Amino acid sequence: MAIITLLEAINQAIDQAMEKDESIVVFGEDAGFEGGVFRVTAGLQKKYGETRVFDTPIAESAIVGSAVGMAINGLKPIAEIQFDGFIFPGYTDLVTHAARMRNRSRGQFTVPMVLRLPHGGGIRALEHHSEALEVLFGSIPGLKVVTPSTPYDAKGLLLAAINDPDPVVFLEPKRIYRAGKQEVPAEMYEIPIGKAKVVKQGTDMTVVAWGSIVREVEKAVKLVEAEGISVEIIDLRTISPIDEETILNSVKKTGKFMVVTEAVKSYGPAAELITMVNEKAFFHLEAAPVRFTGFDITVPLARGEHYHFPQPEKIAAYIRKLAKARP
Ligand SMILES: Cc1ncc(C[n+]2csc(CCOP(=O)(O)OP(=O)(O)O)c2C)c(N)n1
């Protein structure tokens, strides 16, 4: 066991997977020599050489398209997009080829690729570098979408993604790449894709979050706990497919449901989760479900970030309001 950051856990997972499996290749803009814009793949080119770890042109369509071709032909690509806001040129190949190839070829070809994307905001980055685009990926049949909130989860989920026979989009919460450390087992292990985690048990309401927002919810819950409000926190871990069972079991117990996300409100991930709960646990609800999201605006510049992303004090205010709601 070593105590490491989320970023180091991702690096360790890739390193151990590459050591074991020679078919794994790693690439992206500056992902080779520099180890990526955040240095997630640092040291890997030195260890595995330029054939297995390499830089690409600034061409996301080529990155995703090459990954699809490699995956179909027996390699296991782990490709990096610098920020999720730069996925758009690569989105065509991700949707029309990576996601559909198994279906199109009637199972003859699968696309075992991992697409890593630093995700979300909170680091006062330049314009459009802080988007939360989980809906762009979560709404595409044929893609699995996961996002860790801890170093332990990052390693286990990434190893599960690498071993998955189908394409997995791995959203990395850049805000917490280096924000904390945790004990992570030295050996390889997997956390199953499609399973959410109850982070904290509670009885008054269920709050679902994922990625860096889980920490913000935890901070908010500390604030309201002193007031006697008991919150069950669920880390979604997998955006798609949604672990309906874990969420529904919790809502049936607590009777109240809230989603906290930095993604936009309209047509966003909170809407999907709340609809699912309305459809499947409506008669267990004691109040209308609540969503606390980013605003329906183009992601703000660094100066406005603080207002856009859910902050613990504001999350706590939403929790207090829902706690008071009566049928
Ligand atoms: C479509 C897209 N992908 C990635 C980026 C991120 N990005 C910003 S600057 C940069 C490197 C540019 O390198 P170069 O063209 O050599 O110009 P330099 O700034 O080094 O002079 C990258 C990859 C971007 N802005 N747009």
Image (tube, helix red, strand yellow):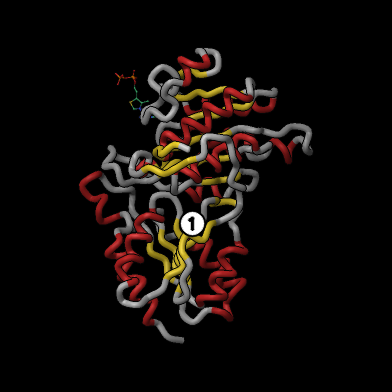
| 130 vs 113: above or below | below
Q: Position of residue 162 (x, y in %)?
A: 60, 34
Q: Position of residue 253 (x, y in %)?
A: 55, 75
Q: Position of residue 163 (x, y in %)?
A: 64, 35
Mark 1 close to ligand 1, CB under 8 Å: no
Identify which residue, 237 or 142, lies in the foreground: 237
Relative placement, left or right, of 74 versus 29 is: right
**Residue at image coords 25%, 53%:** 306
Q: Position of residue 239 (x, y in %)?
A: 54, 52
Q: How many numbered discs?
A: 1
Label 1 crowding class (10 Å Cα cut-off): few <14, some 14-19, many 20+?
A: many
Relative placement, left or right, of 304 versus 106 is: left
Answer with the quarter of the image where residue 323 lies. Answer: bottom left
**Residue at image coords 41%, 36%:** 7
Identify which residue, 327 or 312, lies in the foreground: 312
Element carrying mark 1: strand
Q: Amino acid at mark 1?
A: Asp
The residue wearing badge 1 is 235
| 299 vs 116: above or below | below
**Residue at image coords 43%, 20%:** 43
